[in-house]
Amino acid sequence: MKITDAVVFITGANRGLGLVLAKEAVQRGAKKVYAGMRNTDNFHEQGMIAVHVDVTNPESIQKAVAECGDVSILINNAGIARLNQSPVDAEIVATTRKVLETNLYGMINSTQQFSPVLSAQSESYIVNILSDVSWHPSTFLASYAMSKAAAWSFTNSTRQWFAKSNLHVMGVHVGFIDTDLTQTLDIEKVSPKVVAEHVFDGIERNAFEVVVGESSQQLKQGLTALIPSYISL
């Protein structure tokens, strides 16, 4: 699918990876770029149209769909993360519910509401920003990992559902991204620019999955090992 023929809608586009994705779409000559966010105040990025949307609120998404009925690429980027003391701490259920509300149900809400618009196009794409913790256990990000594993499953289910149409579905697996949310963490991080380039390169070659970064690629390859990469001993 050609980016120059596309109208792109990105959730969580006010900062971080979402904003870089929007800038990449503009740079590649997309016909129109909708930057979805909960608060559009003081957002003035060249080449983008700020659109109010809260992915946890179906009515908000319905209004965004009514305003942006020409979308041909939906990028489900909005997401949150919360730390856990352990996968069985006293707050694990409450924390996981909170994270799922955005990372899973928000993705489902947006996909559900935008799919009729996308299906009406001659060719269209849904891109879901996932994580390599979909495949790898995380003690202190257990809620986040569970949400991304569920979102990966949803991605695969929607890909199967739309397989006979011109609506493609692509999952993007990546580790920690170098944004303001991770700037204090002394860990390996991937540039958001690199992620954005992989995303749009994937769309242009009609990919169903993009795995960004060597560590994420090694993790995926290890899923079928004698001792799989998701087993921590």
Image (tube, rainbow, N blue to C red):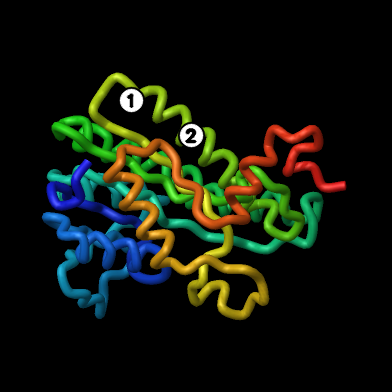
Nearer-N-terminus badge (2/1): 2
How packed mark 2 is, by other alpha carbons closer than 10 Å (few <14, some 14-19, many 20 or more), is some
Distance between the alpha carbons at the discs numbered 2 and 1: 12 Å
Q: Is residue 207 left or right of residue 49?
A: right
Residue 71 can be seen in this image? yes
Residue 62 in which image quadrant: top left
Q: Residue 60, percent across and down?
A: 29, 52
**Placement of 207 over or under 19, stated as above or below:** above
Give the residue pinned by disc 2. 154
Q: Nearer the viewer, residue 188 or 152?
A: 188
Three-letter residue code for mark 1: Phe
Name the secondary structure under disc 1.
loop
Q: Residue at x 72, y 48 (%)?
A: 137
Residue 70 in which image quadrant: top left
Give the residue pinned by disc 1. 162
Q: Residue 73, percent across and down?
A: 25, 45
Q: Is residue 45 left or right of residue 90?
A: left
Q: Is residue 223 left or right of residue 17?
A: right
Q: Residue at x 31, y 33 (%)?
A: 168
Q: Residue 40, percent across and down?
A: 26, 70
Q: Nearer the viewer, residue 54 or 202?
A: 202
Name the secondary structure under disc 2.
helix
**Placement of 156 over or under 181, stated as above or below:** above
Q: Residue at x 32, y 50 (%)?
A: 201
For the N terminus, the quadrant is top left
Three-letter residue code for mark 2: Phe
Residue 209 in which image quadrant: top left
Instruction: Give yes or no for contact between labels 2 and 1 (Cβ–Cβ under 8 Å).
Output: no
Q: Residue 129, percent across and down?
A: 45, 50
Q: Is residue 65 left or right of residue 144?
A: left
